[in-house]
Image (tube, rainbow, N blue to C red):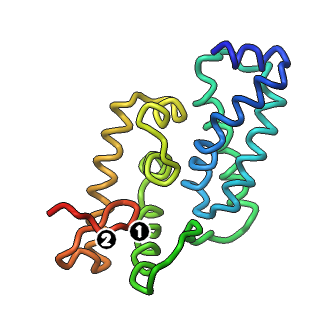
Amino acid sequence: MELVEAACRGDVASFSELYERHYAAVVGVAYAILGDRHLAEDAAQETFALACRQLQGLRKPAKFASWLAGICRNVAKGLRRRRHRHIPAQAVPDRLDDDERAAVDQAVRQAVMCLTRPAREVVVLHYFAGLSHKRVAAALGISPEAVHGRLVRARRRLGRELKAMGLSQGEDYDVAGKRSTTG
């Protein structure tokens, strides 16, 4: 909270540190809305630019992460509207071993984009951005228990979606599209 308060007073180094700490979460929130890594990074840049200009108006420094996520949601929705078309779920750049891996990756990303926005956000932030339950909770302004609950429900929904796509015939896949090694 001291870092946020210092940034509110105009300390550029503090704002830079906040940028470093929250960048991955902001990209994750934007990706959950846009489904495109490059657009999500653009949205993150715009989010931090807006946050920098509006920082003095932040009433509750302890809520910085959720305030930032709210700005990001609005920016991402604006980008989506300006594109005047549906943005397809695209793979985050990944090394593909074979055609099957590419198909599984695409199916997982399609299934993730079918989730509700709150479920998509926690899935993207936790599994794709690698944030802990605690960091996801801070970024979204919810409790770690709520993060856990959303992840449990999202995994169930993703399992049903992947099964409907024909991807669970004797093999289980995790949210990141990898074959599960557990029975």
Which residue corresponds to the image point at 72% horizontal and 51% vertical from the top-left? 43
Write down the quadrant of residue 83 in the picture: bottom right
Residue drawn at the location 76% of the way across and 23% of the way down: 14
Q: The N terminus appears in which quarter of the rendering?
A: top right
In the rendered structure, which amino acid carries the disc numbered 1?
A: Val
Mark 1 secondary-structure assignment: helix
| Disc on res. 181 | none
- The vertical placement of 92 against 20, above or below, is below
Q: Residue at x 62, y 64 (%)?
A: 36
Measured Cα–Cα span from mark 1 to mark 2: 7 Å
The residue located at (30%, 59%) in the rendering is 157
Which residue occupies the foreground of this view, 59 or 152?
152
Q: Amino acid at mark 2?
A: Leu
Q: Give the mark nearest the N terminus, 1 or 2.
A: 1
- Label 2: which residue? 162
- The residue where tag 1 is placed is 108
Residue 26 appears in which quarter of the rendering?
top right
Where's the C terminus, which quadrant?
Answer: bottom left
In the structure shown, which secondary structural element does the residue marked by tag 2 occupy? helix
Disc 1 to disc 2: CB gap under 8 Å = yes
Q: Residue furthest bottom?
A: 99
Residue 138: % across, % down: 51, 29
Q: Depth check: 31 or 1 in front? A: 1
- Judged left or right of residue 126, residue 62 is right
Asked whether, in this view, residue 26 is left or right of residue 180, the answer is right
Picture quadrant of residue 55: top right
